[in-house]
Image (cartoon, grey):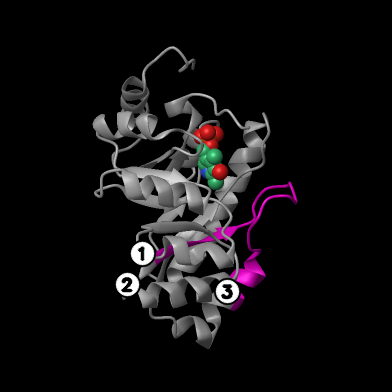
Amino acid sequence: MNFSTMSISENLKKIKGGIPEEVTLVAVSKTKPIETVLEAYEAGQRIFGENKIQEMTHKWEVLPKDIEWHMIGHVQRNKVKYMAEFVSLVHGVDSFRLLTEINKQAKKHNRTIRCLLQMHIAEESTKFGLDEKELAEILDSEAFQELRHVEVVGLMGMATFTEDAEQVRKEFAHLKNVFDQVQLKLPKISELSMGMSGDYTIAIEEGSTMVRIGSSIFGARNYH
Ligand SMILES: *Cc1c(COP(=O)(O)O)cnc(C)c1O
């Protein structure tokens, strides 16, 4: 589909109309200026995803306070403190050390931060995430049970960047399988964050509850 000639509100409407109501749409606004985020806000969007803590913090400071900010990128432990006051969901938690740091910073603000554990499902070794053994180690540890200021509410994963739809489907199906296993142990696990502009339709077919969509809403990103 060619979104480039349509407005942000038209893109949002089109995407929302094409996904089931119970699937949460995270509008990925990384690299986009404040005015652009506001345009989506005015079209009714309230959940935004960013992949850099400093950029997200700046946007949180200047934009309306009823926006839910999701951290979707790789998180450096030394920067958790900047988002601990306001972040609504951290998608990319890929180590127990990071979870511990989020817990520590959340405690300072007397709050609980919701987190997703990121699983490595792609063929590319460059992508972040836990394998199943590491996931089980975290969930089964006593130290994990003792964290009072984080709540693990689900899993997140990114498929291989490929034209091969069957490969992508296989990876999402695998993650859904892991999700179902975890849910048997931890019934409060309810979110499965998978799917981006290029693959969200497949992700939803395979059980995604949350899609992270950037370029199909805002157009291509300019990196500098
Ligand atoms: C940038 C990004 C997205 C959105 O990508 P699009 O292809 O623009 O939809 C989703 N998830 C993560 C983790 C990202 O970094």
Residue 82 occupies quadrant: bottom left
Which residue does the numbered mark 1 point to in the structure image? 85
58 lies above or below 152:
above
Q: Earlier in the sequence, mark 2 or mark 3?
A: 3
Front of the two marks 3 and 1: 1
Q: Would you say 130 lies left or right of 182 here?
A: right
Which residue does the numbered mark 3 point to in the structure image? 96
SS under mark 2:
loop
* Residue projecting furthest to the right: 125
Q: Nearer the viewer, residue 104 or 120?
A: 104
Query: Where residue 81 sits: x, y (%)?
Result: 47, 67
What is the three-letter code of the residue carrying label 2?
A: Arg
User: In whole angstroms, how far apart are the C-alphas of marks 2 and 1?
Assistant: 8 Å
SS under mark 1:
loop
What is the three-letter code of the residue carrying label 1?
A: Glu
User: In whole angstroms, how far apart are the C-alphas of marks 3 and 1?
Assistant: 20 Å
85 lies above or below 201:
below
Which residue does the numbered mark 2 point to in the structure image? 111
User: In whole angstroms, how far apart are the C-alphas of marks 2 and 3?
Assistant: 19 Å
Bounds of the magenta span? 114-137
Q: Is residue 186 magenta?
A: no
- Identify the residue at horizontal 46%, vertical 41% (top origin): 212
Q: Are marks 2 and 1 in contact (CB under 8 Å)?
A: yes
Q: Are marks 3 and 1 in contact (CB under 8 Å)?
A: no
